[in-house]
Each structure stands twice: as structure tokens, then as C-alpha cells.
Amino acid sequence: MTSLSSLQALLVATLYSAVPLILAAMGGVLSERSGVVNIALEGFMLIGAFVGIWGESAAEHHGFHALAASLLGILLVVAVGALLGLLHAFFTQHTKMDHVVSGLGINLLAAGATHYAYLTLYPNGVMVTGLSRASFLYLAVPLPLFIFGLLYRTRFGLRLRASGENPENAILSGMKPIPIRYAAVTLSGVLGALGGAYLSMADAHSFSTDMSAGKGYVALAAVIFGKWNPIGAALGALFFGFFYALQTQLQISNIHLTFLGVDWSNPYILDTLPYLMTVAALLSVVGRIVPPASLGRTLDEN
């Protein structure tokens, strides 16, 4: 393979690796700009990955055409993602549960439920026709611009940002931040679940335990790295997507890289590359980023 074709393959792989991160990160931007911490993105993605496969495989089993089965799977992903988002919003806004605790609970629920359901329903594995990766790419590419316009060019976006920056003043001006937070977190559940559906329905056409493999946390890191701006978060997702793609390309090319006596081409070391770069990127912006002023704060509209 020539250097030019290798570079082209790496760039294409970067785009596709960034797709699930962009989808989940846009959900994270909406949620956190409204004031709700959302580490539940990992759980949203994992549930979305399983539900998409389950819905499509069930539809195919009942004689649905492949495309119709895939679309049914996507509809189920959207519905379940919305329900999980509502659950996170309920815990954080009505029961006043700590946002991180609620998110961790959803992540643990997703890990346990998908593992049990997968082993129970598909002891011999499962394969589906799925959708093309490009179909998700067409959604992910314009989405940051759409979210940017929603946040900064609409009345809903103004209210959403006010809910995350100064909800008390928003209440005094007649706004109701809690319903706005519900809407934002529900949308984040949908987008996170769609990011997971990409992994199973478009990339692997199958499901495996712990399929999200921390990508929800990486998407949240992209939100922080991008300073809670949808364009910045998308660029962060591309940055992290590059290292997922680089990891894959290095494994395929079987290139041996030795530095400081360490074989960096070792598959176990390569697997950590995206996560090491995520930590490094976050460390590089510590002290230089300002989150929404009311992010994670308990709110009482009374």
C-alpha cells in the first residue's frame, strides 16, 4: 500500500471512527449546557447498540425486508434512548439525585442488562444486515451545525443555555428550567443511543458484550475538550476518532514501533491509545476551560 493510499485510508477511518463520538457528544452538549452532567452517555450508547440489533434481528426473523427491519431497529433505538434520557432527567431533577451517581447507575444498568439479554437471547451470537456506515455519516456531519444553530439562533436554545448558566434568573424571568432540562437530556439519550446503534448496526452488524467500550466517556471528554460548544465538541470527536483509526490501521499494517524499549505496536498497548490520548487532551485544558455555571447543581423552581 502506497503512502498516499495509507493516508487516505487513515482519513476515511478517522471520519467513520468519529461518527458515534459526534452523535453522543452532541447529546452531551445539549444535556450539559442545560445544567445536567451526563456521564450516562456510555449507558445510552450500550443500550442503543443492543436494542438496534435486537429490533432488527426480531423484525428479520418475522419476515421483514432488510431495510424495513433496520428502520424498525432505529425507531426502537430512538424510543429506548428517549426513555433512558427521561430516566436520567427524572433522577436528577425530581429526586435531586447527584448527577454523577445517576449516570453511573444507568451505565451499570446498561452493562448488566445488555450482557444478560445478549447471552440469553443469542447464545450463539447474532448477525444482521444492518445499515451502511455512510447513512450514519450523513447524519453526523451536519449535526454539529444544526445543534449550534439550535443553541445560538433559537429561543429554545437561549432558554436551554440560561437553564445551565443562571437558572434562578431564568425562573425570575418566567422560564421553567426543569422542563427544558428534561427536553435536553431526553434528546441526549436519543443521540447517545444512535451513536451506539452505529457501532452495532453499521460497523459490526452484530453485538458483543461491552460494545461501547468507553466511547461514551470519550464522547463526554470531547464535549469538555470542545468547551461545551457543538463545533468544538465535534472537532474533539474527530481528534479522538483519529486515534481510534490510527490504532486500527497500525494493527492492520503490522508495523512495529519501538521507543524507549517499549513495543508500541503491541495490540494491548495499541488498544489503550485512544484512552491515553483522551486523558492527555483533558489534562492539557485543565484550568483553561469554564463549564456552564450551574452544571450539576440541584435546582428547585419553588
Image (cartoon, grey):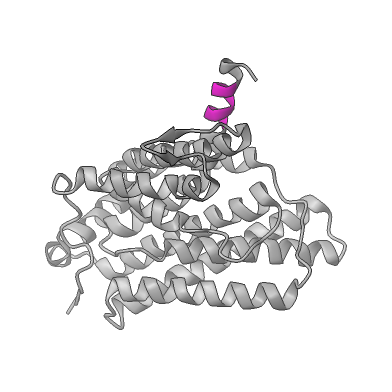
Taking the magenta stretch, the answer to whether it contains residue 29 is no
Q: Position of residue 300 (x, y in %)?
A: 19, 77
Give the quadrant of the C terminus: bottom left
Q: Residue at x 17, y 64 (%)?
A: 167
Q: Is residue 135 visible?
A: yes
* Placement of 22 over or under 118, stated as above or below: above
Q: Is residue 184 left or right of residue 10?
A: left
Taking the magenta stretch, the answer to whether it contains residue 11 is yes
Q: Residue at x 50, y 71 (%)?
A: 83
* Placement of 108 over or under 129, stated as above or below: below
Q: Nearer the viewer, residue 214 or 49?
A: 214
Q: Position of residue 226 (x, y in %)?
A: 29, 43
Give the quadrant of the N terminus: top right
Q: Nearer the viewer, residue 2 or 88?
A: 2
* Placement of 121 over or under 134, stated as above or below: below
Q: Is residue 65 left or right of residue 250?
A: right
Check the image and name the residue furthest to the front. 261
Q: Is residue 150 visible?
A: no
Picture quadrant where residue 113 is located = bottom right
State whether the magenta stretch is mostly helix, strand or loop.
helix
Q: Residue at x 45, y 50 (%)?
A: 272
Q: Position of residue 223 (x, y in %)?
A: 33, 49
Check the image and name the residue furthest to the right. 63
Q: Which region of the structure is painted magenta?
A: 6-12
Q: Position of residue 44 (x, y in %)?
A: 49, 64
Check the image and name the residue furthest to the bottom. 95
Q: Is residue 254 left or right of residue 96?
A: right
* Placement of 295 over or under 140, stated as above or below: below
**How many numbered dots are placed on residues in this image?**
0
Q: Nearer the viewer, residue 149 or 45?
A: 45
